[in-house]
Image (cartoon, rainbow, N blue to C red):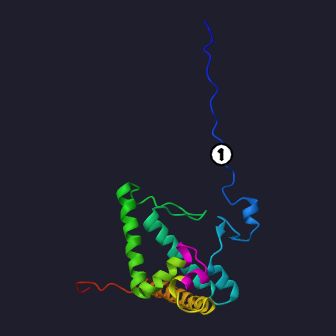
C-alpha cells in the first residue's frame, strides 16, 4: 500500500496582543489598563479636576450602552458570569439591544438633545474641545469656544451622573417597597 502525499496544513497566525504598537502607545494617546483604550477629553477633565470619577463612570456606562445598542457588541468584565436563565438566540439579543436603545432615549429626555450632542462628540467621535468649539461656535474666538465647550461638557457629565444616581435610587426604593396583599389576612 502506498502512502498518500498530503499537503501541509496552513496554520493561521494568531496575534498575541491586539493593542497599539509600541510606537503608537509611546505617544501617550492611550490610557493604561485592560483593554487599552484611547484617551479622551473625559480623561483630560478628570486629570484637571473638573469632574469626579462618578462622572467618568457615567460617561463610560453611556458609551458602553450606545455601542451595544447601535453596534451590537458588548465587552464583559473578566469576572462576568453569563446568565443561564435566558435564551441566547438572535431574537433575545435584538430585544436586549432594543432595551438599550430605549434606555438611551430616557437619557436623552433627561439631559436634552444638546447634551446628547456633546456626549457623542466627546465619547463617540473623540473630538477635542477645540474641534467641538469650531463646529458649535464658529463665529467666536477659538479660545473662548474651547472654554465654553469644556464647561458645557462638564455640566452634561454631571447631569448624566445625576441621572444614573437617581435611577439607582428609584430602583432601590421600588425593591424595598412592600407589595400590599390584595385580600385581608
Residue under the point 60% across and 93% down? 144
Q: Residue furthest left?
A: 183
Would you say 93 lies left or right of 123 here?
Answer: left
Q: Tag 1, which secondary structure? A: loop
Residue stretch rendered in magenta on the structure: 122-134
Residue under the point 33% across and 84% down? 179
Q: Nearer the viewer, residue 185 or 157?
A: 157
Q: Residue furthest top?
A: 1
Picture quarter with the C terminus: bottom left
Chief secondary structure of the magenta span? helix
Residue 15 in percent (x, y) is at 67, 49
Q: Nearer the viewer, residue 28 or 12?
A: 28
Residue hosting label 1: 14
Residue 56 in percent (x, y) is at 60, 81
Asked whether the viewer can see residue 173, the reply is no
Residue under the point 63% across and 33% down? 10
Picture quarter with the N terminus: top right
- Circle 1 residues within 10 Å: few <14, some 14–19, many ≥20: few
Relative to residue 33, is residue 103 depicted above or below? below
Picture quadrant of residue 41:
bottom right
Amino acid at each position: 500500500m502506498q502512502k498518500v502525499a498530503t499537503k501541509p496544513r496552513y496554520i493561521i497566525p494568531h496575534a498575541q496582543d491586539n493593542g497599539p504598537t509600541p510606537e503608537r502607545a509611546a505617544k501617550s494617546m492611550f490610557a493604561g489598563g485592560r483593554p487599552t483604550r484611547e484617551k479622551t477629553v473625559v480623561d483630560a477633565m478628570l486629570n484637571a479636576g473638573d469632574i469626579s470619577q462618578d462622572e467618568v463612570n457615567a460617561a463610560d456606562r453611556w458609551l458602553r450602552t450606545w455601542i451595544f445598542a447601535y453596534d451590537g457588541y458588548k465587552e464583559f468584565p473578566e469576572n462576568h458570569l453569563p446568565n443561564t436563565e435566558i435564551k441566547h438566540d438572535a431574537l433575545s439579543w435584538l430585544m436586549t439591544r432594543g432595551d438599550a436603545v430605549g434606555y438611551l432615549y430616557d437619557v436623552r429626555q433627561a439631559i436634552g438633545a444638546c447634551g446628547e450632542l456633546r456626549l457623542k462628540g466627546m465619547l463617540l467621535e473623540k473630538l477635542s474641545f477645540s474641534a467641538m468649539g469650531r463646529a458649535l461656535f464658529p463665529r467666536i474666538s477659538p479660545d473662548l469656544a474651547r472654554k465654553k465647550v469644556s464647561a458645557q461638557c462638564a455640566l452634561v457629565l454631571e447631569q448624566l451622573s445625576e441621572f444614573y444616581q437617581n435611577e439607582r435610587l428609584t430602583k432601590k426604593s421600588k425593591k424595598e417597597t412592600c407589595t400590599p396583599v390584595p385580600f385581608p389576612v
